[in-house]
Image (cartoon, rainbow, N blue to C red):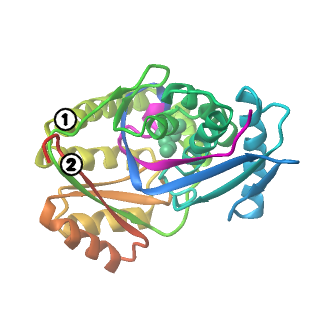
Amino acid sequence: MHASATSTAPGKVILAGEHFAVYRRPAIALPLESVSTTVEVRPGPHDLLVTQLEPGDHARAFALVRLARSRVPGWADQPVEVRVAGSVPVGMGLGSSAAFAVALTRALAVAAGHDWDAEAVRTVAHELECQVHGSPSGLDDTVIAHATPVLFRRGEPPRPLRAGGPLHFVLGSVGYAGSTYEAVAGVRRLAEARPDWFAGVLDQAEREVTAVVEAFEAGDAAALGPHLDAVHALLADIQVSCPDLERLVTAARDAGALGAKLVGAGCGGFMLALTDGPRQSVVADALRRAGAEPVFVLSIKGPNP
Ligand code: MEV
């Protein structure tokens, strides 16, 4: 019958296509293994949730536990004790809610003896994400459940991607969260107010994602950089950047980054800079001097490291 089980899910970083993914345009995202969420579940006498979350978030997470329990066969009538630990910063564009949803779903499935593949886990995790964010595209739960770089389009199976050569990134935080729900709602208001303009922005965003995928698969950092800048400009056009993100993006470029952009929903959270190998630590230092905290580095190995 039920055993205890533990599952760990990574964070994620979106290279291109955030926000536009909501409108069925493509997006490319990478798992971010340097941060993760671990969920441990065990049958209990009653439902119990142990986390370090704020009380408001705790109530929400508890509702997610109940929903997940109702979706994983075998758990419906079995109270569960859930322990959550992790390092994915909450509400910062690195996929904290999707990492929780994926780790929780997988732990429940494993404990109940199901051999679920990534897609089965993602389906339930996506339902949890809908409860948190309204109508998310599924980009976050997809890249985190599959734990591999993906080309994503809403409603379609993801295409796994491989970098054609080593790529070096730096991530810097402005130090406060943005609300995905509000950012997505703000973009929707713009889209409704200026439909012709927004249709043009969507087409441009799709062209950028195509170019980003091509450069990523070629492992061509020099080609990739300007497209990341172009993606950032589109995100600023749809008003999800903010002065602090602009400051960090500029600091990274001034320090020699090949390209830089905000990541995720924006209006706070993290930005990402692409560098060549030797400049990774130089850009990381420049971001720290510009006030970024925390700063992470992310290096992707090519096919023949
Ligand atoms: C948030 O990480 C990604 C967004 O594109 C929202 C979504 O895809 O649902 C902003």
Dot 1 lies on which element?
helix
Dot 2 lies on which element?
loop
- Return the x and y of residue 137 as percentages of the image width and height: 52, 31
Mark number, residue 217: 1
- Return the x and y of residue 179 as percentages of the image width and height: 59, 53
- Return the x and y of residue 121 as percentages of the image width and height: 57, 31
Pick the front one: 273 or 10: 10
Pick the front one: 28 or 299: 299
- The residue located at (35%, 33%) in the rendering is 150
Q: Nearer the viewer, mark 1 or mark 2?
A: 2
- The residue located at (43%, 73%) in the rendering is 293
Give the amino acid at mark 1.
Answer: Glu
Tell me where the magenta segment starts and ends, as one range.
Answer: 1-21
> Hey, which residue is sitting farthest bottom in the picture?
289
Rendered position, 139 above or below 220: above
Compared across the picture, whether 143 is left or right of 104 comes to left
> Hey, which residue is sitting farthest top in the picture?
156
- The residue located at (47%, 25%) in the rendering is 154
Give the amino acid at mark 2.
Answer: Lys
Q: Is residue 24 visible?
A: yes
Mark number, residue 301: 2
In the rendered image, residue 16 lying in the magenta stretch gets the answer yes
Q: Earlier in the sequence, mark 1 or mark 2?
A: 1
- The residue located at (38%, 58%) in the rendering is 271
